[in-house]
Structure formats: structure tokens, C-alpha cells
Image (cartoon, helix red, strand yellow):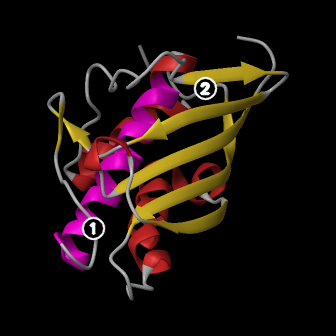
Amino acid sequence: MSTPGSATHAIEARLRRLGLSLPAEPPRPAGGYLPVVEHHGIAFVSGQFPFAGGALSHHGRIGLELGEDEGLQAARLAALNVVAQIRRHLGGFERLQGLLRVEGYVASAPGFFRQPRILDAASALFTEVLGDTLGSHARTAIAVDQLPLNSPIELCVCFATTNTP
């Protein structure tokens, strides 16, 4: 439960203002690995896809099967799933010290070079929801021919936490 003035309360309020909600249960890993691993105040969120309601919301490559607008939507949804994984792992947002790095893999058609624009949707969501201090991050955009499950995007995120729960 969040208390007024807490980071969790502030983030929940931002989500409501934006008309967004985090999934009650973040997506399960697609294989034999953990969704989040934390060690000495640094945590890594395993690759997150644009899942909604237990299913992949978008399929295919941006610039071929999907347009840019669909890619932007997929990036925002994958980012929401990242935030949901962080919330679940930390039991709220009180221990979150901030995002560090976002790696965005974008399944792209040949000749599509706007991966940074697609990832801007995820970056914007992080700062809108977490605020500038917790949501700002370094980032890498990587174009790939295809991704697991035929997803258009996969986000891998590193964040800092306080060392003690």
C-alpha cells in the first residue's frame, strides 16, 4: 500500500492522470529465466515484449507488417510491462533509485532506419510515469531482422535500487 508523498503514490497518480494502468500480473518470462535479477543495488529486467492481457499485441517487423504508429504503440506497451516488472520485483517504487540503461531491439524491415524514433515512445513513457529523476536513462537502439514470438520490439532495462528492502 502506498502512502501519500511516497514514490509509489506519485507514480500511481501519474499513471491515473495519463489514463494508464499496469497489468496486475506482469508478463511471465517466455523461457527458463527470471523476469528481474538484482545484485548490490543494480537490477536487470529481462526482455519485455508488448504483451497485453496475456497475448502479444503486435506481430511483425516495423516498416513491413507494421507501420510506425503501431511500432510506437508496441514500444509504449513494452515499457509499461517494464514498469510492472519493476513494481512487482520491488514491491512498489520506494527502493527505485532510477533507470540506468534501456536497450531496445526493434524488428525492422530492410531499409527502415527510424529505430530511435520508435524507442522514443518507450523513453517518453518512462519519464511520464516515473518522472524525470527516476525515468531518465541512457539508451541503445538495435535493429534486428526478427525477434522471439514475432514481436516488433523487445526492451531490456537496467535500474538502480537501494541495497536494502
Mark number displayed over residue 71: 1
Quadrant in the rendering for residue 109: bottom left
**Magenta segment boundaries in residue numbering:** 65-87
| SS label for mark 1 | helix
Residue positioned 70% across, 11% down in the render: 165
| Quadrant for the N terminus in the image | top left
Residue 96 coordinates in the image, percent (x, y): 64, 33
For residue 84, above or below residue 57? above
* Amino acid type of the residue that numbered disc 1 sits on in the rendered structure: Gly
Quadrant in the rendering for residue 67: bottom left
* Main secondary structure found in the magenta portion: helix
Residue positioned 19% across, 50% down in the render: 19
Residue 16 coordinates in the image, percent (x, y): 25, 44
The answer to whether marks 2 and 1 mark residues whose Cβ atoms lie closer than 8 Å is no
The residue labelled by disc 2 is 94
Residue positioned 26% across, 52% down in the render: 17
